[in-house]
Image (tube, rainbow, N blue to C red):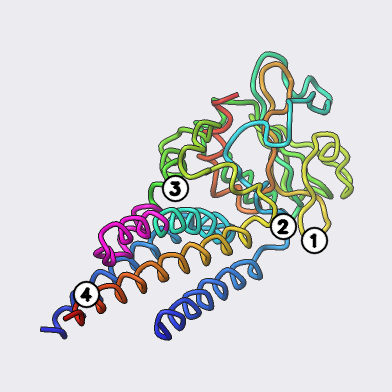
Amino acid sequence: MHQLIALWLAVGAVLGGLSLVSRLTTDPLDDPNPAYQRPGFLDVSGPPYPAAPLGAGLPADGSRSVIFFTRPSLEASLVAALETDPGLRAAARLVIVVCGRPLAPPRAAITAVAESPACPTAHLDRMRTPRDGGPPVGYAIVGPNGLVRYTTLDPEVATHLSEVETMTRTV
Amino acid sequence: MRRRHWLGLCAWCLLAVVVEVGLYLSYHDHDAGFHWFAHFYAGASAALLLMSLVSWRQRRPVGLPLLWVVAAHLYAMVPDLLFVTGIPHQPWMDVFLGHLTIHYIPGANLTLFAIFMASFAVYLGVISRAAGANDDATMAP
């Protein structure tokens, strides 16, 4: 009996410790509630709602849009990743909202919009605030009817574009 | 003979650990821990309760218990495996041990950890009683 109790305590200590370590090693750009980061299904926060207008006909009527929110230091890697992903470019109109001063120049086929660090569009699109309290790094997917169907923070979105495409093709 | 038995058992333990490490790495991001733990606790809890039932009926522990846990974890992860093939999560996927809903229960992974520990205690209690019953049967005149 004592051996079983010791086993129970040992398993609890190991798994509890690993859970704690995992919880402490999150990124400052992560969502404070990980359940809302990359949930993988639509309308996680409730019914769809209209996307904030970005000017110049964006988000585009009748076609899907993906609005990426990023910070100046991460813009170049995001643009580089998007330029090498024809699948996602074919699936939706791509917009990058840079919350702060953009470093990289705008590229063809990918619309870039500069905003202040407060990033008002992110608030209108109901993007969640990362752990560090700064502007979001993630994306919102807007359906052909102009309604936001999916939002998530994702600091490593440049390496998850296939995931973005999977979600985009469902709206 | 006893040493060979333990070597065989440890081989299965090692295989289970390797598979679980592989599953953890399959999420390959810093938010992997949250998802891996959630589905591991859900799968392992279900496996332990099922193992408790089987052990109670058979009056002896189940064979290769860690493989039951791994199998249940894989079952709980099915929607994530489907996602890799381009199928997003949908509400009906809660049939895979509450794959979507468990992330939003109060307390999240802490609650799931508590459920896992309770399920583990149930299983250990059942096999302890089974062992006691077998000892009594062996000692009976």
User: What whole-number distance in Å separates the C-alpha atoms at marks 2 and 1?
Assistant: 6 Å
Q: Position of residue B96 (x, y in %)?
A: 45, 41
Q: Which residue is mark 1?
A: A132
Q: Position of residue B54 (x, y in %)?
A: 31, 56
The reply to whether the C-beta atoms of the residues labelled 4 and 3 are less than 8 Å apart is no
Q: Nearer the viewer, mark 4 or mark 2?
A: 4
Query: 10 Å neighbourhood of mark 4: few (<14), some, or many (≥20)?
Result: few
* Disc 1 element: loop
Instruction: Tell which subunit mark 2 falls on.
Output: A
Q: Which residue is mark 2?
A: A29
Q: Which residue is mark 3?
A: B76
Q: Quadrant of the C terminus of chain A?
A: top right
Q: Position of residue A165 (x, y in %)?
A: 54, 33
Residue at 54 percent of width and 49 percent of height = A159
The reply to whether the C-beta atoms of the residues labelled 2 and 3 are less than 8 Å apart is no
Q: Are marks 2 and 3 on the same chain?
A: no
The reply to whether the C-beta atoms of the residues labelled 4 and 2 are less than 8 Å apart is no
Instruction: Tell which subunit mark 3 falls on.
Output: B
Depth order, front residue of A13/A81: A13
Q: Are marks 4 and 2 on the same chain?
A: no
Q: Are marks 1 and 4 on the same chain?
A: no
Q: Which residue is mark 4?
A: B137
Q: Is residue A26 left or right of residue A50?
A: left
Quadrant for residue A73, please give it.
Answer: bottom right
